[in-house]
Image: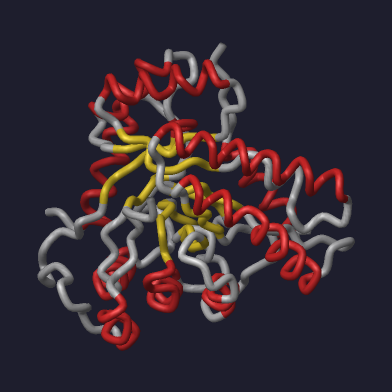
């Protein structure tokens, strides 16, 4: 039986909280290019200034029509112009195998897994039972990633609440993630923490510090360009995070209407974002995280990625 989870449910939960709240394939630049990227200049080996960026296009599995079989969904993603998909946590092993067959048949790679337990059961909780369930969900996600050949598992590391203050969220989440890193290394799958509307990791200086304190190549950042628009500029975050960025999420945000919108219809300065990605020589996957739709809609979204993110004419 196919199961489907909506990332939008988590985004809505985050909005409510904000208003109330083998190691390969990452988009990292070479260490030799770090200084150049930080200065804003091109890193050694980066694309020519006018060349399209070598970023791989992906779509969330949950954006594909849920009434279709997995086989039909992956085939649609390929026809729409996407070469990869970001899947979600699936506990049932038979369904996991079904998803892999569908992806393989369509020639679409599953490049990442979105962990689905971090909002309901945050690692920052003071309740040991909640933390136990959160860790279990991450172990399932890491196992899914290994089976599918994905490079990363996306993790929302903590949620700050009236009951869990900022310093507690920082300390507890890092302690629990440390317990997961040996498994991540064993499986060859990176844990990539994302900045969301969870009242945590709120600046482009703090996010790198959080990642660096792990001192592990198996802990990276999953940067969402749309999630910081309300209080910052994604191009600045990209330059500060630099080689820490394993993967990207793409969506737009309109500061006037306070809504997430389609790419190019919000407040993001896409040429500035593209220049920042070029400066750090990012060459990994970028996954659109928008409302779902039919094939015509997905094809249009794919073309928007080509123009706004990759810089294709």
- Picture coordinates of residue 261, whole percent (x, y): 46, 48
Number of disc labels: 0
Place residue 7 in its image quadrant.
top right
- Picture coordinates of residue 88, whole percent (x, y): 53, 35
Q: Is residue 145 above or below residue 93?
A: below
Residue displayed at 29% across by 70% down:
29
- Picture coordinates of residue 95, whole percent (x, y): 52, 18
Residue displayed at 41% across by 52% down:
250
Q: Is residue 71 above or below residue 29?
A: above
Colour mapping used in the image: secondary structure
Q: Nearer the viewer, residue 199 or 300?
A: 199
Residue displayed at 45% across by 44% down:
289
Give the quarter of the figure containing the C terminus: bottom left
**Apparent side of residue 308 relative to residue 187 in the rendered image (left or right):** left
- Picture coordinates of residue 97, whole percent (x, y): 45, 20
Residue 254 seen in this snapshot: no
């Amino acid at each position: 039986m196919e199961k489907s989870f909506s990332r939008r449910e988590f985004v809505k939960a985050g909005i409510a909280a904000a208003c109330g709240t083998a190691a390969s394939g990452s988009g990292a630049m070479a260490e030799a290019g770090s200084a150049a990227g930080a200065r804003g200049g091109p890193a050694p080996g980066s694309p020519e200034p006018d060349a399209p960026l070598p970023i791989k296009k992906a779509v969330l599995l949950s954006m594909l029509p849920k009434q279709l079989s997995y086989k039909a969904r992956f085939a649609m993603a390929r026809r729409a112009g996407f070469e990869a998909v970001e899947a979600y946590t699936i506990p049932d092993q038979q369904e996991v195998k079904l998803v892999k067959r569908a992806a393989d048949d369509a020639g679409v790679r599953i490049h990442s897994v979105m962990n689905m337990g971090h909002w309901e059961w945050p690692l920052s909780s003071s309740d040991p039972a909640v933390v136990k369930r959160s860790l279990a969900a991450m172990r399932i996600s890491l196992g899914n990633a290994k089976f599918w050949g994905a490079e990363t598992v996306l993790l929302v590391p903590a949620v700050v609440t009236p009951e869990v203050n900022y310093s507690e969220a920082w300390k507890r989440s890092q302690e629990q993630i440390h317990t997961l890193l040996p498994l991540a290394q064993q499986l060859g799958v990176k844990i990539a923490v994302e900045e969301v509307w969870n009242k945590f990791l709120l600046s482009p200086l703090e996010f790198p510090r959080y990642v660096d304190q792990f001192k592990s190549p198996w802990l990276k950042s999953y940067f969402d360009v749309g999630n910081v628009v309300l209080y910052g500029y994604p191009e600045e975050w990209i330059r500060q995070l630099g080689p820490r960025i394993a993967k990207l999420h793409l969506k737009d945000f309109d500061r006037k209407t306070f809504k997430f919108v389609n790419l190019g219809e919000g407040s993001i300065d896409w040429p500035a974002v593209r220049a920042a990605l070029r400066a750090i020589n990012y060459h990994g996957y970028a996954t659109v995280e928008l409302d779902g739709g039919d094939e015509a809609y997905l094809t249009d979204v794919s073309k928007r990625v080509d123009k706004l993110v990759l810089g294709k004419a």
